[in-house]
Amino acid sequence: MNKLDQLIAALEQALSNKDWDELVRLNEQVQPTIESVMGALEAGQEDPEQVRTRLETLRRFVDTAGAGASQAKAEAEAALKGVSRNRNAAQAYAHVSSTRSK
């Protein structure tokens, strides 16, 4: 259970830092960690209510992370559109400038 608590804390920290690479790395640890906790639960080594609470915390994190990822994607798309507009404007200016000087 401690490993799950540590993983949740690390995931939350990575999300608050918007460290998408770290989130991807940590995401790879989620399934094996949950499988370990579920095995301990089935063996009667963990309290079902504590496991449920941790899994609910993890689910809320996933919802929050999904919203954060969607926002980051939208911000990246807007930035790329801005770059494209600036490039198009620069090309148009270069074209107008070159035709004027002729």
Image: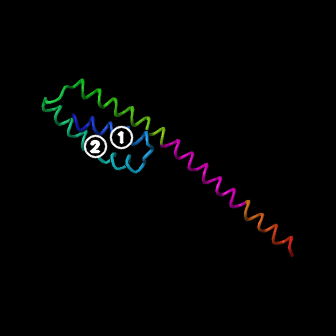
44 lies left or right of 51: left
Would you call the spot at circle 2 few (<14 residues within 10 Å), some (14-19), or many (20 or more)?
few
State which region is magenta.
69-88
Which secondary structure is most common in the magenta stretch?
A: helix
Q: Is residue 93 magenta?
A: no
Query: Looking at this view, is 75 or 17 the one in front?
Result: 17
Q: Residue at x 30, y 42 (%)?
A: 30
Label 2 sits on residue: 31
Label 1 sits on what residue type?
A: Leu
Where is residue 6 drawn, in percent x and y? 27, 38
Q: Amino acid at mark 2?
A: Gln
Dividing the image into 4 quarters, which one contains the N terminus? top left
Q: Residue 46: horizontal and vertical position, in percent? A: 17, 29
Tell me the number on the disc at residue 42. none
Q: Which residue is mark 1?
A: 11
Which element carries disc 1, helix, strand or loop? helix
Residue 77: say if magenta.
Answer: yes
Lower sequence index among marks 2 and 1? 1
Q: Residue at x 52, y 45 (%)?
A: 72
Name the residue furthest bottom.
102
